[in-house]
Image: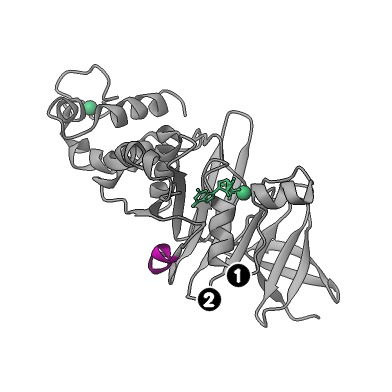
Amino acid sequence: MSTPLEGTIVAAFGRHYEIELADDSLITGIPRGKKSAYACGDRVAMERASADQAQILRHLPRTSLLYRSDAYREKLIAANATQIVLVVASEPSFSDELLTRALIAAESQGMRSVLVLNKADLTERLPPARQRLLPLQSLGYPVIELSARENAAALLPYLAGELSVLLGQSGMGKSTLINALVPGALSATREISSALDSGKHTTTHARLYHLVHGGSLIDSPGLQEFGLTHLSVSAIEEGFVEFRPHLGGCRFRDCHHRSEPSCAVKQAVEAGQISARRYEQFLRLRAGG
Ligand SMILES: Nc1nc2c(ncn2[C@@H]2O[C@H](COP(=O)(O)OP(=O)(O)O)[C@@H](O)[C@H]2O)c(=O)[nH]1
Ligand SMILES: [Mg+2]
Ligand SMILES: [Zn+2]
């Protein structure tokens, strides 16, 4: 009988995984079945197959699972993460609906959220981007302005002690940020790619990095959409943190907060306590993810 082998997935390639063992050495993990339902950050139990390979038997209990879904499939993003770091930039422009969706997914898993406004050096483009983040900032989500090209240190205190997942649309500067935070990471940015002429400037798989200043960070492929069809109605409602104080106050217990009489949520929108934009996004999510 071999002793049970456990480790943490630090890179997810789809068909196989890179797994870190307790002594920090790495091993390749191959899932047993055809369907690989593991994510970066997962703790797994394995059976060793050779010196550098093991068969993954199962994942150990997860404290969180961040994933997105549409009508056809689910896509695991990260397991056991405690926080999402949402990267936007002064340019190109970003989708605030995507931000809201990621925030809802994080809230549903009890994860913290931090927003990074990158490319602060492009000062002319900064004020409108700031303005668009204001509604989220006023809900209590921290917004950290920085220029990943120049100095990313402002983010470090938020990362210590957390397992964070870096999320954002492509072009926002995630790879540049990873390279600033993790010396030697060599995450492919647009410049590096054109220099190598590989045409590959996108992160194609998730990878977990340990930070020198404490905490770990999972880099994930760029996000263009964030389907939430897997979330229950109450997870969506409660994911909008500013709805929480009003949720018990509607006349009907199963209120959709759409056109029902005496709806506490709609009243809060009319009173300016809930932003019209967020309410609109709620209605769209509520209507089917
Ligand atoms: N001016 C400026 N450009 C940046 C900054 N961070 C990233 N960029 C540029 O934005 C582009 C996209 O960056 P990249 O890291 O590849 O974004 P990703 O797709 O989110 O990984 C590249 O041309 C970067 O050099 C920054 O702080 N300031
Ligand atoms: Mg990238
Ligand atoms: Zn209501």
> Crowding at label 1, few (<14), some or many (≥20) Cα neighbours within 10 Å?
few
Q: Quick one: label 1 or label 2, which is nearer the N terminus?
A: 1
Q: Are marks 1 and 2 in contact (CB under 8 Å)?
A: yes
**Magenta segment range?**
153-157
Task: Report, in whole angstroms, how far the alpha carbon at label 1 lies from the one at label 2.
Answer: 9 Å
Q: Which residue does the image show at 46% across and 63% down from the upper left?
A: 151
Give percent across and percent down for residue 146: 41, 56
Q: Which residue is mark 1?
A: 183
Up-down relation of residue 2 to residue 162 (above or below)? below
Point out the frontmost of discs 1 and 2.
1
Q: Residue at x 56, y 42 (%)?
A: 171
Q: In the image, what residue occupies the spot 64% across and 51% down?
A: 189
Q: Is residue 155 magenta?
A: yes
Q: Residue furthest left?
A: 271
Can residue 39 be seen by looking at this rendering? yes
Q: Which residue is mark 2?
A: 212
Q: Is residue 61 at all visible to an observer of this figure?
A: no
